[in-house]
Image (spheres, coloured by chain):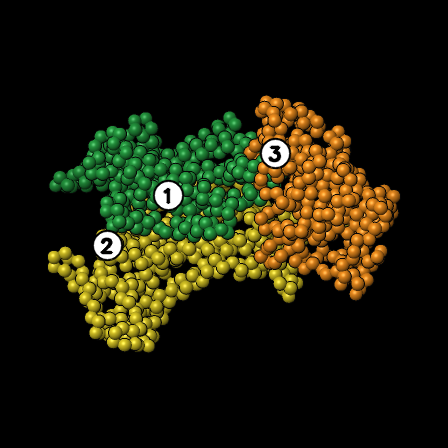
């Protein structure tokens, strides 16, 4: 167990390093460097001409004249040691201040979507497998197919339209007007929860459909296993047989997917944020990327990725707790 | 069922009459078991032999009501279970997962399967599954159940049982797993044990050990056993009585001695010719010619006539042979003896 | 021989075709078996049918579309779909017709108001010769034959967008763009996946370990944000064709891991199969064993994986282009078409702008059905 833990932990650290390098490359990818854009923005907007010397100064100031590995090292140590992600030139403020609690809103959104996914996919998947070829099973399969094939921005628009025409209120945003700029308080949390479900449904639908299919398929596999009949042959009540054995085992793949789920949901966030105008990190990421504000975009990417990598680590541990075959190194 | 009752002495445990099981599949209806009858006496071992697909597993699963939903048991079939206290239960009339059926499953009829590998849940310990079984059938505390579990593991010859009880099935070897499976079953104290090819997937030395263990435990617990195998050689070691099955029918029945020494049905004879024997070392072994017909295209007449060397054309392929007694205990379905 | 070795009747029984085919059945090759099983899967056939229609549209877009992708109709801006009918109060017509319509801007609300002229019928003409086009973006023969048109004026069965472009025509061109992007992307992913997975699975040992870890690494990096980051890094001044190429490359390069894993797993299990071991014992060379014995058993699985991968490509392209990080106008793709419909006003004012979504959904469904059907046929016990 300890060995497994250490293994996964080291792997997590390596992954984080890898991710940070990739993101650093992405940040540096656009043609022209930060200095040029900075200089043009700062000086040209003030009506001054940009001279060669200005460029050199700016380069030196930001350490851009150093080789790439050094630049990476400076970038990442600033982040780890000082929480300094650089400056957004889109807004001329430190990236750190820009992101604020948007990243937590995104995580709250993703977590809600995951809970929703589990709450729907697991019971429906079990039902579908137990009552295979029933009307309910076909219905679930059908809805699952639709859920998988409908782009989620479309779903967002449909829900939005529905909420405006039928419910008479806009489902966009994460807060009501009076709470939008307010400080955190209990009523604000409640208000957030009231708004959260629409984006959570939008984000979670495809994933729910996916897990529903997985759950159904693994359940069907497991129900045919000999140990299920063996348990029945011991006179165990049917519901207990089902829940103690196949259901328990069919949960393993779902748990092992937690990290990737998080990834998929966060990945969909920018698109949904755009349609539903959510004030979360996804929306900021999109804005930053569209404007090639790479420090801001890179910072958000890095935060999101870090959370996902940690999520993968946690799901690895949970899986080990659930499945002795993994815990004891039997794969 | 009033026909059979006169012959049954008080010692009969299980009485199967005219059992018919079919499966509804996309390709059509598969008649897996076609009207078989047999009975098991207290403390005796009934061996059921037959090639793959002859319906051995399906008939025993019918007894335990473990058949999948696609299976249909004919209305006229009867499976009667005689309790120690004289009560009789008609199993076919019981609700599948009902309380009465659950009492029989495990507590009165135990079952072990062909593959010890997959008869245990991979994510629960051996002990967990034994304790679960004990608690389901005996009025004991969890702690006592655990002691029973350890005790049982010891009895089936697993060393260091107090450690093994907390291990998972994948930590045990194949032979050990089958021993553990026997421990699970015996911990519920059944009066009939159904062993569906319990040794097929084990290697030969382990097979012998398990057979030995089963023989010994059967005496100790005074259980009746239904022992399923497709190896007549194994049957000779364990069974008192033998039923030979082919394509869902019993072709020949008799004591183990009679079946081994005076096989009557050509099918039994050819099964015997296919076993290597010490006293016939010089001779060639002969496999049974021809293929087992697809279960979808059951031959008319005697089911074996398509592969039978002594088939009488015009008779065997059109009419169904009736039951012919050879001796008090020995019967055969074959036109050669009618 | 003991009775033990008589083959199980159980397995084949479940899939046995009728009598006359029986002999063929036992001597059939893998792909024939797959085809026989597939033929009986209704959803799979439906998927195949849908995709055939798409391929037809993809190939013959110029011919099927009544107008060019950028043709403007200033008479009919943001106009609703015109309905083709066979009869009205003025009587029945064998030849379908639409009414003559124009739109005008409401001076107050600025919305475009269509006016339908019920008295003027425009009859549909088939195989009309109108505007000339160069087939396949001017790379092949030129022609002016269109599948249909109207005798006078214009016809917009799916309506028009805010510039007066015909949505039906644009959807057809978009189908070509989005599907070819998918094909190329999947092909890239497949080639890389085959090489990496093939090396890992066949060579094993150190190589396997290294590739495995690499795959795990790449899979832990969240993909769409990474797509977005990479796509955002593309220079703004690049021509659309170059962007198109890069987006395809990005999607392809990041997608190979799933395929590589599947190929590796399959190869590993195949390596243990009796007939492969037999071939090895008989002294076959590595290349020969892979080509003669492993690949045939393998192709059907690979095809399934490829088919299943398409929806992912399509949806990724649609999402990226939708938010403005993927393909850009004047390239016409499903995602680009939907850019015009990002907000709720679009649903209220011009819901027909969403018609392309139906094409996306059906494409994804088609691939999913086909993939599921093929998988069941290739691997009935899994
Ligand atoms: N679930 C099922 N659906 C359809 N047919 C089945 C099913 N289970 C068994 N059968 C059919 O019933 C027949 C008897 O099967 P059974 O498992 O009883 O054979 P067996 O004698 O136990 O063989 P083996 O030695 O292989 O275990 C076979 O022809 C098989 O095809
Ligand atoms: Mg069997």
Residue B86 to residue C193: above or below: above
Q: Ligand 2 near label 3 (Cβ, under 8 Å)?
A: no
Tags 2 and 3 in contact by the CB under 8 Å rule? no
Q: Is residue A212 left or right of residue B31?
A: left
Q: Which residue is mark 3?
A: B170
Give the color of chain A as drawn: green
- Kindly identify which chain the residue marked by label 2 belongs to: C
At which x and y percent is residue C38?
53, 59
Using the numbered discs, state the Cα–Cα distance from disc 2 to disc 1 in whole angstroms. 25 Å
Name which residue lies at 51% across and 43% down. Answer: A218
Q: Which chain is orange?
A: B
Which numbered disc, 2 or 3, marks the residue closer to the eye?
2
Density class for disc 2 (Cα within 10 Å; few <14, some 14-19, many ≥20) is few
Q: Which residue is mark 2?
A: C348
Residue A295 seen in the figure:
no
Cα separation, mark 3 vs mark 1, equals 37 Å
| Element carrying mark 2 | helix
Q: Which chain is yellow?
A: C
* x then y, percent, for residue B144: 61, 23
Mark carried by residue A204: 1
Tag in front: 3 or 1: 1
């Amino acid at each position: 167990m300890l060995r497994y833990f250490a293994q996964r932990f080291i792997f997590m650290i390596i992954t984080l390093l890898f991710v940070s390098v990739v993101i650093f490359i992405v940040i540096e990818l656009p043609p022209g460097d930060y200095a040029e854009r900075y200089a043009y923005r700062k000086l040209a907007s003030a009506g001054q001409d940009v001279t060669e010397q200005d460029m050199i100064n700016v380069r030196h100031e930001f350490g851009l004249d150093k080789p790439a590995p050094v630049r990476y090292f400076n970038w990442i140590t600033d982040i780890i040691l000082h929480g300094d992600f650089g400056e957004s030139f889109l807004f001329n403020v430190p990236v750190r201040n820009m992101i604020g609690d948007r990243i937590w809103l995104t995580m709250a959104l993703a977590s809600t979507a995951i809970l929703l996914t589990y709450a729907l996919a697991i019971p429906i998947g079990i039902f579908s497998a137990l009552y295979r070829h029933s009307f309910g099973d076909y219905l679930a399969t059908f809805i699952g197919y639709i859920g998988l094939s409908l782009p989620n921005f479309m779903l967002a628009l449909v829900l939005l339209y529905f909420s405006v025409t039928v419910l008479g209120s806009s489902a966009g945003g994460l807060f009501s007007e009076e709470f939008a700029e307010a400080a955190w308080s209990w009523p604000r949390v409640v208000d957030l929860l009231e708004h959260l479900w629409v984006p959570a449904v939008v984000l979670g639908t495809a994933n729910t459909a996916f897990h529903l299919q997985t759950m159904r398929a693994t359940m069907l596999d497991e129900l045919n296993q000999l140990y299920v009949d063996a348990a029945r042959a011991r006179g165990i009540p049917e519901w207990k047989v089902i829940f103690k054995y196949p259901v328990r085992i069919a949960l393993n793949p779902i748990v092992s997917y937690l990290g990737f789920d998080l990834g998929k949901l966060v990945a969909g966030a920018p698109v949904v944020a755009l349609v539903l105008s959510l004030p979360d990190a996804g929306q900021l990421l999109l804005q930053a990327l569209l404007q090639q504000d790479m420090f801001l975009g890179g910072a958000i990417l890095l935060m999101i990725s870090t959370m996902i990598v940690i999520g993968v680590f946690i799901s690895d541990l949970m899986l080990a707790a659930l499945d002795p075959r993994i815990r004891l190194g039997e794969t | 069922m009033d026909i059979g009752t006169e012959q049954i002495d008080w010692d009969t445990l299980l009485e199967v009459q005219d059992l018919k099981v079919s499966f509804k599949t996309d390709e059509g209806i598969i008649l897996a078991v076609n009207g078989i009858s047999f009975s098991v006496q207290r403390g005796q071992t009934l061996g059921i032999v037959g090639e793959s697909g002859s319906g051995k597993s399906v008939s025993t699963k019918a007894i335990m009501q473990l058949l999948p939903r696609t299976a249909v048991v004919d209305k006229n079939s009867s499976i009667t279970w005689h309790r120690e206290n004289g009560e009789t239960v008609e199993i076919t009339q019981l609700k599948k997962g009902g309380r009465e059926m659950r009492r029989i499953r495990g507590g009165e009829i135990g079952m072990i399967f062909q593959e010890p590998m997959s008869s245990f849940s991979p994510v629960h310990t051996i002990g967990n599954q034994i304790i679960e079984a004990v608690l389901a059938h005996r009025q004991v505390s969890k702690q006592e159940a655990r002691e029973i579990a350890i005790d049982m593991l010891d009895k089936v010859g697993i060393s260091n049982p107090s450690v093994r009880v907390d291990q998972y099935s994948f930590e045990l070897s194949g032979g050990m797993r089958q021993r553990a499976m026997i421990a699970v079953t015996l911990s519920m104290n059944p009066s009939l044990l159904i062993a569906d090819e319990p040794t097929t997937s084990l290697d030969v030395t382990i097979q012998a050990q398990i057979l030995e263990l089963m023989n010994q435990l059967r005496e100790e617990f005074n259980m009746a056993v239904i022992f399923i195998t497709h190896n007549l050689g194994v049957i000779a070691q364990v069974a008192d009585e033998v039923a030979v099955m082919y394509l869902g029918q019993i072709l020949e029945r008799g004591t183990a001695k009679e079946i081994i020494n005076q096989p009557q049905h050509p099918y039994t004879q050819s099964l015997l010719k296919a076993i290597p024997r010490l006293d016939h070392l010089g001779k060639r072994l002969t496999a049974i010619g021809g293929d087992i017909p697809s279960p979808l295209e059951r031959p008319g007449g005697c089911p074996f006539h398509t592969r039978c060397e002594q088939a009488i054309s015009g008779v065997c392929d059109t009419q169904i042979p009736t039951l012919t007694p050879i001796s008090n205990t020995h019967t055969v379905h074959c036109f050669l003896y009618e | 021989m003991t009775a033990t070795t008589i083959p199980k009747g159980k397995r084949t029984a479940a899939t046995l075709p009728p009598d006359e085919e029986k002999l063929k059945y036992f001597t059939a090759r893998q792909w024939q078996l797959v085809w026989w099983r597939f033929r009986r899967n209704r959803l799979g056939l439906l998927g195949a049918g849908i995709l055939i229609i798409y391929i037809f549209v993809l190939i013959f877009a110029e011919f099927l579309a009544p107008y060019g992708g950028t043709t403007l109709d200033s008479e009919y801006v943001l106009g609703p779909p015109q309905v083709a009918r066979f009869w009205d109060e003025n009587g029945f017509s064998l030849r379908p017709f639409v009414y003559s319509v124009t739109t005008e801007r409401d001076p107050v609300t600025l919305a475009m108001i269509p006016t339908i002229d019920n008295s003027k019928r425009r009859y549909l003409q088939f195989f009309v010769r109108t505007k000339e086009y160069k087939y396949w973006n001017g790379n092949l023969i030129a022609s002016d034959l269109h599948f249909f048109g109207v005798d006078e004026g214009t016809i917009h069965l799916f309506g028009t967008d805010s510039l007066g472009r015909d949505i039906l025509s644009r959807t057809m061109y978009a189908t070509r763009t989005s599907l070819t992007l998918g094909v190329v992307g999947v092909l890239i992913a497949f080639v890389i996946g085959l090489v990496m997975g093939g090396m890992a699975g066949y060579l094993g040992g150190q190589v396997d370990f290294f590739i495995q870890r690499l795959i795990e690494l790449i899979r832990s990096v969240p993909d769409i944000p990474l797509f977005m980051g990479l796509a955002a890094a593309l220079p703004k001044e690049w021509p659309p064709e170059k962007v198109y190429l890069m987006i395809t490359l990005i999607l392809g390069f990041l997608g190979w891991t799933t395929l590589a894993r599947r190929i590796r797993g399959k190869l590993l299990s195949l390596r243990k199969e009796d007939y492969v071991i037999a071939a090895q014992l008989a002294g076959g060379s590595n290349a020969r064993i892979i080509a003669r014995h492993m690949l045939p058993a393998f192709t059907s699985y690979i095809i399934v994986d490829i088919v299943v991968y398409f929806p992912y490509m399509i949806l990724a392209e649609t999402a990226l282009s939708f938010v403005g990080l993927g393909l850009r106008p004047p390239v016409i793709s499903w995602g680009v078409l939907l850019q015009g419909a990002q907000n709720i006003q679009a649903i209220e004012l011009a819901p027909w702008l969403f018609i392309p979504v139906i094409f996306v959904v059906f494409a994804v469904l088609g691939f999913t059905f086909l993939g599921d059907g093929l998988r069941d046929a290739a691997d009935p016990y899994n």
